[in-house]
Image (cartoon, coloured by chain):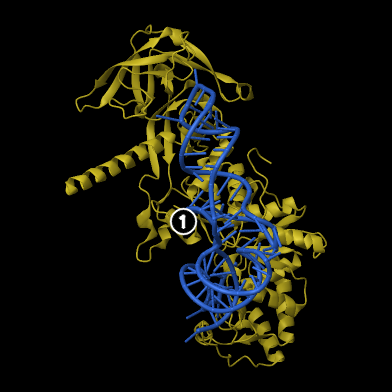
Chain colours: A yellow, B blue
RNA sequence: UGGGGUGUCGUCAAGUGGUAAGACACGGGUCUUUGGAACCCGCAUUCGCAGGUUCGAAUCCUGCCACCCCAGCCA
């Protein structure tokens, strides 16, 4: 298990499994399955289910099957199958030889349907979809029986055979379970088992023109694979009655369906429909856009599989529908990367500084540890220092507020690993914008300390100007500006897209060692965050870095507090004025 | 006026009759050449509400309330 990954906490599903193991219900077997429909790319919500199912199998010495729920050929494609398998592997899970497709069971599903017909438990209905809907009743009123409900077994057998043989057009007839049109659970009002779809299936080709429905397929697939715990999301709770009914009527092996609450994450959207729309309409740059919480998007952003797994462990599993704040995800990413990413220096928004008393043309090299908390762990690199260098524009303020520890006129700060410098002069352009700083340095402070032991409050990062590696840095932020963009009935969720979800900085300056950065490497740019050398856009000598996540920013919090206090003081003052 | 679920700290989440785990957040402190990390301390007399049973209730009973899901030939 990766560093930082905690012992899984208990949850109601683990309790069920442990109880089953005690009672011997399944003979100690634990077999789960991950059953995606291959009609889209996997996202963070699927990751929760993957971690749950594969994690359970791992922890209880069982196995987890990979099964594609491919019963609707009009929506499904091979491309999705490939991408799903790639993503699950990338997340760190493996199904070994247990790769299945619901379509592999079409023959036995057909035989099971025949059996149901013979037992008088299913019938062919000639009604149209509209008619069936009209006779289903409502939430409070029972439905009524189809006029075709009382057909003889022979007639049903004949009709179903002819459906199978392609004698009827799409939609002409369906096979329905004969249960109870007055059942309080709508799912049980003679549900459709098979429909006609004269469509080529991506795996079975033209072999079939009738395709089984989810409720009929899923339970029997679970049964065929001898699944023990069939874990799905809450919206299938009503379907469990049908899951159990089918298995009971047929008298076959009967797994237990268990439902859990799907993941809801704030400041993003998760439905396949919306994700697809964002891609198709160009709001993002593709399925792997780093702002998308698809597995591919997170991978491109630089998230690690360990971080995603850690996140899934931490949020837990329950039946309560909850909305998880993005900080859970970001925190998991930081915690994972904190112990893994080498530290380097990069200036995102450069401001030039010249040291007036540093010899022109002189270059020094400092040895800097990649991992200061444990220097031997990752070794060190040489970082050149010279008379001219860049600092972060926001690390200088001409008129700094309280508690600002960084550079300001007359103020001394430490340049990380280098010297103490004191700002002596501020140079501005016509518009009054600061263009350059002049400083003096203390030669006795080499390495970052002085013989007199005087303290400097702030340490800032820097990059030597003549040695700097220019780079493009992309700053990613949450895609939406409100917690639940889909919750507004009369507004489109796209109205809430965050215009600053991507900010590209073309002029970042990185320390010399980063000229050799390999695509796919992750670093911490000290004081700024974790960054990922983009595997696609990096060019030799011209790196492109994606910001994976920022560091916790205590200074931002202080600023906010100061702002709040100021606002409150102003309100108070106004009140006093009114009174007076 | 149907059925199925869920309600425990700001946010997740244990707990299933014996007197409210843990994590994140938050507050305070130590340390610090990242305002990062690490470390220490604090943080629900109370479990949606109201009754009841019991020596004892978040857990059992009754009644309310709130929210979610279900009327695809989607999954």
Q: Is residue A147 left or right of residue B36?
A: right
Report in which chain the residue with disc 1 lies: A
- Other-residue count near label 1 (Cα within 10 Å), few / some / many at <14 / 14–19 / ≥20: many
Q: Secondary structure at mark 1?
A: loop
Residue at 40%, 45% (x, y): give it. A501
Q: Position of residue A378 (x, y in %)?
A: 61, 24
Q: Position of residue A479 (x, y in %)?
A: 42, 49
Residue at 56%, 60% (x, y): give it. A262
Q: Position of residue A422 (x, y in %)?
A: 35, 15
Indicate the quadrant containing the N terminus of chain A: top left, top right, bottom left or bottom right. top right
Q: Is residue A420 left or right of residue A147?
A: left
Residue A149's quadrant in the figure? bottom right
Q: Position of residue A446 (x, y in %)?
A: 47, 11
- As rendered, which of A302 and A560 lies closer to the eye? A560
- As rendered, which of A1 and A86 lies closer to the eye? A1
Q: How many marks?
A: 1
Q: Is residue A122 above or below residue A151?
A: above
Residue at 77%, 71% (x, y): give it. A253
Per the image, the residue denoted by label 1 is: A269
Q: Is residue A341 left or right of residue A58?
A: left
Q: Is residue A84 above or below residue A490?
A: above
- As rendered, which of A454 and A2 lies closer to the eye? A454
> Is residue A237 something that shows in the picture?
yes
Residue A361's quadrant in the figure? top left
Q: Is residue A443 above or below residue B26?
A: above
Residue at 70%, 85% (x, y): give it. A121
Q: Is residue A568 left or right of residue A555?
A: left
- As rendered, which of A62 and A209 lies closer to the eye? A62
> Is residue A111 something that shows in the picture?
no
Residue A565's quadrant in the figure? top left
């Amino acid at each position: 298990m990766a560093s930082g990954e905690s012992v899984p906490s208990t949850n109601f599903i683990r309790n069920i499994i442990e109880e089953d193991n005690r009672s011997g219900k399944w003979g100690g077997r634990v077999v789960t399955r991950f059953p995606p429909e291959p009609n889209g790319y996997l996202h963070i919500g699927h990751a929760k289910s993957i971690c749950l199912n594969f994690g359970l199998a791992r922890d209880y010495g069982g196995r987890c099957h990979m099964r594609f729920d491919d019963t609707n050929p009009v929506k499904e494609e091979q491309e999705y199958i490939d991408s799903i398998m790639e993503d699950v592997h990338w997340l760190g899970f493996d199904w070994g030889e247990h790769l299945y497709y619901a379509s592999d069971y079409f023959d036995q599903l057909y035989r099971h349907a025949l059996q149901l017909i013979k037992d008088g438990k299913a019938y062919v209905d000639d009604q149209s979809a509209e008619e069936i809907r009209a006779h289903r009743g409502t939430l409070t009123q029972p439905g009524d029986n189809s006029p075709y409900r009382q057909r003889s077994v022979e007639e049903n057998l004949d009709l179903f055979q002819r459906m199978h043989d392609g004698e009827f057009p799409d939609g002409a007839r369906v096979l329905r379970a004969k249960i109870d049109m007055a059942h309080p659970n709508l799912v049980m009002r003679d549900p459709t088992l098979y429909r006609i779809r004269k469509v080529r299936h991506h795996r079975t080709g033209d072999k079939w023109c009738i395709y089984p429905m989810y409720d009929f397929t899923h339970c029997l697939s679970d049964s065929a694979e001898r699944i023990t715990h069939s874990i799905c999301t809450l919206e299938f709770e009503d379907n469990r009655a049908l899951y159990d009914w089918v298995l009971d009527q047929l008298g076959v092996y009967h797994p237990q369906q268990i439902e859990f609450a799907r993941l809801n994450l704030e400041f993003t959207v998760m439905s396949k429909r919306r994700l697809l729309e964002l891609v198709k309409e160009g709001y993002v740059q593709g399925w792997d856009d780093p702002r998308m919480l698809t597995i591919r998007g997170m991978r491109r952003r630089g998230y690690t599989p360990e971080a995603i797994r850690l996140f899934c462990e931490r949020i837990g599993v329950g039946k309560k529908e909850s909305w998880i704040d993005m900080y859970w995800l970001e925190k998991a990413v930081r915690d994972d990367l904190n112990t893994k990413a080498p530290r380097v220096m990069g200036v995102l928004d450069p401001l030039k500084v010249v040291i007036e008393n540093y010899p022109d043309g002189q270059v020094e090299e400092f040895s800097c540890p990649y991992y200061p908390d444990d220097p031997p762990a990752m070794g060190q690199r040489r970082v050149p220092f010279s008379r001219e260098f860049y600092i972060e524009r926001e690390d200088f303020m001409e008129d700094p507020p309280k508690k600002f520890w960084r550079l300001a006129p007359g103020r001394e700060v430490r340049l990380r690993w280098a010297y103490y410098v004191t700002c002596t002069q501020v140079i501005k352009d016509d518009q009054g914008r600061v263009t350059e700083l002049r400083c003096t340095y203390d030669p006795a402070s080499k390495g970052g300390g002085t013989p007199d032991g005087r303290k400097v409050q702030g340490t800032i990062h820097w990059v030597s100007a003549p040695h700097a590696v220019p780079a493009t840095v992309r700053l990613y932020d949450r895609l939406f500006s409100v917690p639940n963009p889909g919750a507004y009935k009369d507004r489109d969720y796209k109205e809430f897209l965050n215009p600053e979800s991507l900010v590209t900085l073309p002029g970042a300056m990185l320390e010399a060692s980063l000229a050799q950065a390999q695509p796919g490497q992750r670093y911490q740019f000290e004081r700024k965050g974790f960054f990922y050398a983009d595997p696609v856009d990096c060019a030799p000598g011209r790196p492109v870095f994606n910001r994976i996540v920022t560091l916790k920013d205590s200074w931002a919090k202080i600023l906010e507090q100061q702002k709040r206090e100021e606002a409150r003081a102003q309100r108070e003052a106004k009140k006093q004025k009114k009174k007076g």
